[in-house]
Each structure stands twice: as C-alpha cells, then as structure tokens.
C-alpha cells in the first residue's frame, strides 16, 4: 500500500507541475487524471489507516466529474463479457453479499440500478455491465463520500461522519454523476462509532458493488472471515496467480 501511495503522490506532483502535451496525448480521454489520482490516494490511504490523509485527498475530488475505463471489441468490458450470457455466471440474489441483519433497505434504489430479477430465481446484473462496450468508473462519487464518512468515524468525529453518511443515503440518481442513488432517509441509528461504522460498511457493499473493494472492506471492518460462523468472505487472502508464479521465480509463498 505504501508503494502505491508513494507512486500516486509522485504522479500528483507531476500533474500539479503541469504535464506535457506528449504525456497528455497518451492518457485515455475518458480518464480524468487529477481527480482519479486524488480518488486513489483517498482509497489507499484509507486502507492504510491514514485517515487524515484519506480525508484530505477525498476533499480534493470533484464529485461532479466522471473518470472511466474505456473498452472496445478487442478489450471488452470484463464483467459484461463474463455475465453476458447469464448461463454460467450471474448474481445469486439481491443481497450484495450482506448478512441478514444488514440487508439492503427494500426501498434502496441502488438495488435496481445494479441488478434485476426478471423471474423468480433469475437475478441479472445490469449497472455498468450490460454491454461489452460499457465504460466502468475508475471511482464512484459515493466511494469518495463514504471514504470521508469512514475517515471521520475512525477519527471519532461522529457527527461529521453521519453528515457524510447522510449524503450517501439521501443521494438520488439525479444527484449522482452516474445516476446511482439510494434515495433513502438519513441515518437514524445509534450515535456510536461501532454502529456508524457498521452502517458505512453496509453502504460500501451496496454503493460499491463489484468494484473489487469488498474483500479489503471485510478485513478492515473485521467482518467474519474464513472458517468463522456466518463468514462474509471465503478467504482472508487469495493466492498469487499461476501466471505470476510461472513467470517470476521470486513470487513469495501464498499467504
């Protein structure tokens, strides 16, 4: 994590100093580089426990801007490609991997944004994955808002954390750069760090569905893991890919 943060800080210094036209011409036009670097700094600093740095980087992100990975026929949207047939891989339900006591609210409008149930037992993913050419966001505005909420909560600034959490809960599709919004009432739970963090975790699992962040989230929030009752992940760490091991004799033992 520290290496990633260091590289991003170096990138930010180059951006702040002004990138040459030659370098800018190599960047995907769909990627907003300054906002993406700040968003990733916020993400990785949060993972590393650098909550003040995470908050500062998150504050620098323009939530009205979009930054996307582009795809084409040669390099298709990977999730659209995998889920396209719905015969091999599809959603199991509309629970977003959450336990029974943290299931999405029945009125949560993020659920039909990401998935639908055209018939009993048939759950199909939609969201950013309906076509091989769909772009996938580098980060979501809701992630940045939830980073702010979590950083404040972990710094024990609970009122500030709830303010940021409420911004996610009450956000409508019309408010969001990607049309993603829960459109729910404000937080009404206990004003304790534990309760607020649990609600932040629940919203991360829904808002950031299939962004690849859930494994880290379950570890950071100390959710039940491999071998524990009601496990919310099937492994604490995953093995190195065979392709990496086959091509790099220095690959460490699997964790």
Image (cartoon, rainbow, N blue to C red):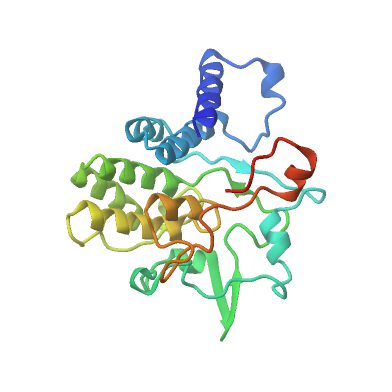
217 vs 248: above or below: below
Give the image location of residue 211, x and y in percent: 55, 52
Q: Is residue 58 above or below residue 166?
A: above
Residue 179 horizontal side relative to residue 220, left or right = right
For residue 66, say whether it is visible. yes
Please identify the quarter of the rendering in which residue 101 is found.
bottom left
x%, y% of residue 62? 44, 35
Of residues 192 and 65, the one drawn nearer to the viewer in this rendering? 192
158 left or right of 102? left
Q: Residue furthest right?
A: 74
Nearest to the observer: residue 72 or residue 79: 79
Disc tally is: 0
Left or right: where 117 falls relative to 163? right
| Residue pictured at 57% horizontal, 33% vertical | 32
**Which residue ends up furthest to the front in the rendered image?**
253
Q: Where is residue 46 in the image (x, y as percent from the top left)?
A: 40, 39
Residue drawn at (56%, 17%) of the image: 14
The residue sitting at 60% across, 43% down in the picture is 68
């Amino acid at each position: 994590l520290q290496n990633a943060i260091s590289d991003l800080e170096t990138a930010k210094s180059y951006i702040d100093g002004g990138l040459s036209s030659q370098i800018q011409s190599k960047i995907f036009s769909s990627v907003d580089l300054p906002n993406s670097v700040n968003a990733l700094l916020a993400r990785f600093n949060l993972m590393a426990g650098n909550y003040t740095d995470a908050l500062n980087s998150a504050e620098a992100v323009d939530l009205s801007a979009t930054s996307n990975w582009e795809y084409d026929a040669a390099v298709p949207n990977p999730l659209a490609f995998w889920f396209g047939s719905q015969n091999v891989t599809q959603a199991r339900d509309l629970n977003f991997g959450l336990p029974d006591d943290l299931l999405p609210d029945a009125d949560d409008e993020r659920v039909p944004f990401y998935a639908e149930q055209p018939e009993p037992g048939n759950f199909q993913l939609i969201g950013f994955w309906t076509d091989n050419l769909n772009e996938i966001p580098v980060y979501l505005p809701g992630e940045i808002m939830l980073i702010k909420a979590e950083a404040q909560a972990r710094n024990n600034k609970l009122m500030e954390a709830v303010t940021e959490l409420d911004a996610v809960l009450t956000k409508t599709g019309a408010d969001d750069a990607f049309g993603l919004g829960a459109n729910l009432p404000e937080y009404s739970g206990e004003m304790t760090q534990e309760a607020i963090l649990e609600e932040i975790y629940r919203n991360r699992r829904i808002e950031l569905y299939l962004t690849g962040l859930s494994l880290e989230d379950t570890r950071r929030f100390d959710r039940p893991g491999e071998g524990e009752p009601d496990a919310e992940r099937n492994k604490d760490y995953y093995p190195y890919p065979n392709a990496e091991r086959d091509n790099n004799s220095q690959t460490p033992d699997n964790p």
